[in-house]
Amino acid sequence: MNMSSNYAKEGDPVTKSYIKKNKRKKTRIILGFIIPALVIYMIFTIYPIIATLNYSLTDWSGVSGESDFVGIQNYINLLGDSTFWQALQNNLFLVLVSVFLQIPLGLLMALVLFTPIFGKQLLNIVFFLPYLMSTVAIGILWLFMYDPSSGPINQLTEFLGIGMFDWLGDPNLALMSVLFVLIWQFSPLYMILFKAAMVGIPDELYEAANIDGANGFKQFVHVTFPSLIPTIVTSSVLAVVGSLKAFDIFYIMTGGGPGTATEILGTYMYDQAFINFNMGYASTIAAAMFIISLIAVIIIQYLDYRRKKKGILI
Amino acid sequence: MKNKYTLFGLASSLFIITGCAGGDLETNGNEEADGGEDQSSNGEAIDFWYIETGEAEEAILNAVERFEEENPEYTVDPLQIDNDDYKQRLVVAMSGGDPPDVFHSWGGGWLEEFVKGDQVKNLSETQIDSDRFVDTALDNSTFDGDIYGLPLSLSVVPIYYNQEIFEELDLSEPETYDELLGIIDDLNEQGYAPFALANRDRWPGSFFYMYFAERLGGEELFEQAVSGEGSFAEDEYIEAGEHVQELVEKEAFNSGFNGMSYDEGQSRQLLYTEQAAMIMDTAAFPNSAMDEYPEFVDNIGMFLFPDIEDGEGDSDNLVATISPTWSVYEDSENEEASVELVNHLTSTETAEEYAETSQPPAIEDVDSDDPFVNEFNEHIENADYIQSVYDQALVPSLAEVHLDTVQELLGLSMSPEEVAKMMEEEAEDTRD
């Protein structure tokens, strides 16, 4: 009774304050949920980013208390540093491989698992297995796979009459060899993403396509693929950012060598920070990685935004 | 009703998961936090970081125990850290202002960076007896005449060979470099890889370069290049690079060595499976073989890198790595006790136990019944000069250039002249 009368007289100051109070209460609850995560996020993510930007403006060894403020000198040095450009080039190559090989392969594996193929359960496990292993184990496993004299891969290539290759020791092959392992390791991640997205595509679309006379391939082009575009965008963001901050598999398998053949920003930053005692310069490399990732993500998001605005698909 | 139970189950399992994670985090944090607290409150616990594993670890923990028995008012918190992680962990601990009281290092340029940052205690001012150490080993942690670390082991680098293969092919230990080249040819003819090399890690290949440089230019070459009197672009260094490439062209190494990992045993494996006949390695090799393939140990012979005709070096001179070296943190609250712990860690008793792992001690007059240690000790006594490996002795950034360029030299992707030029350019930056 009281309630309904309250709603009836909306201009009433009592009602206003009631709504306000209600809103404030809601805000408080929402804040209550956000704050714990926010505090942790600020301390462990935002603060280190700002601190890194700050260090990147100093000449600091990382062990002594003293650090000299040098302004943007580190950034100027970075632009003239041939190893940095070599590393960046390797990283960009890694991005291309991730986006144009890992994601399509993940999509292909997901598609295979949606066909009524024999032994689907087994394939499901086999496809996903690499992603479950720890990177260190994978790195060591593939060191032995690539072993020049007794590794299975060279045994195979020799058996096939192609000859033996120096997979990790030859500067022209080393990067490819590591990238192959990365594809092997990370394609299952995209497979899972695509599988989840495919489950979400309504059956009605396929039924309608069927009635219109679309065969399997046409159904993929006109129904499945368009429905997966948001997942492809998300995967691309993951792939780009993941490739730019890659480190572990390279550190384990080649350490950036031979020479600088497989040097990437992550390994170069590690060397500068912990081997060469240039924490300031290492921070500059980290800052550069951050900026490049940020730009890449902004571009992808902008393209996606334009696509949505034009309303091309979904 | 059913839903309620599921929810309850889910909630409690979540609780357990997060609880466990939280617990882990806490204990991890405590290891470091504890040290800090104890230091400030009652000054009784000493944090101690080391990297040894297996038998060597036992020798070190026994030394810690002896210290605790003699100094019951102190307890030691030993923390074993993986070799791979160690450099990173110590740099972070130092910059975070919460390092261990006593810590491991390899001496040389890496330790010197901490010394420059005023993080390491000058041990010359404390109660140590520096006379008992082999000079080269102690020099590795002496900067401007002050001692900043005490070494336990001096790991010399000989060439090891498979005695059976040598007997079978009627080969004998070479006296000169030309004889070594002859052996390489003979082994190649019989289908063996002469040297096993896993050079992903870069330092195993660097031994060859250092030995060539020493045999050609003598002990002065390196010292003068470091000080700036000479340079890393001297003719002898270029010649050393040429010899390294000569070996590669003569197929003195197994194929694909630049991509193979020493740590994962990919070079030693070639030796055990008799695909290769020789390996240049530190004193750690017999102990690794003992672990990995005990039957092989009796088959190991060793000789030193031979003389080169017209070279100024001496075939008795050695290349060696020094590890471990122990130092004390500058602002340690338990300075005296920490120094005392370092003394225990480098005592004759500890060295004797450590020698059971076939690693020669950096301390003089240590008795051992290990045949390898006795042979190492003999070499150490005969040597006029012991070259501490470049990647320890040099400033870290220059050491990196050295390791990178020698890897490229071995990969034939850089000429000896280019290597010399790059080394000298970086060296110029590091000389003040």
Image: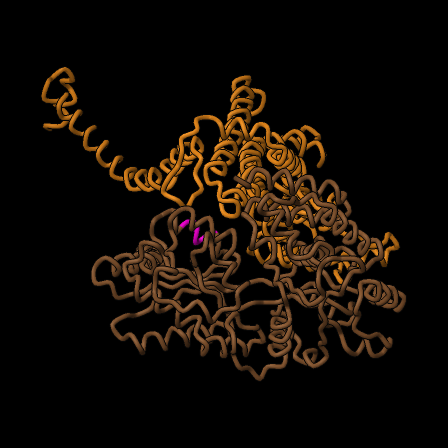
Q: Quadrant of the N terminus of chain A?
A: top left
Direction bottom: furthest residue:
B369
Tell me which segment is drawn in magenta: B88-92
Direction top: furthest residue:
A11
Q: Quadrant of the C terminus of chain A?
A: top right
Q: Residue at the spot x=65%, y=66% of the render?
A: B157
Q: Residue at the spot x=39%, y=70% of the render?
A: B343
Viewer-nearest residue: B147 or A292 = B147
Residue B75 in which image quadrant = bottom left
Residue B395, image x, y percentages: 54, 47
Viewer-nearest residue: A265 or B115 = B115
* Residue A146 seen by the camera: no
* Up/down of A251 relative to B136, above or below: above
Q: Residue at the spot x=36%, y=77% of the render?
A: B66
Residue B143, image x, y percentages: 47, 53
Q: Give me the chain that's orange.
A: A
Predominant secondary structure in magenta? helix
Q: Give me the chain that's brown.
A: B
Viewer-nearest residue: A231 or A152 = A152
Residue A55 in which image quadrant = top left
Q: Is residue A170 magenta?
A: no
* Up/down of A288 relative to B243, above or below: above
Residue B239, image x, y percentages: 77, 49
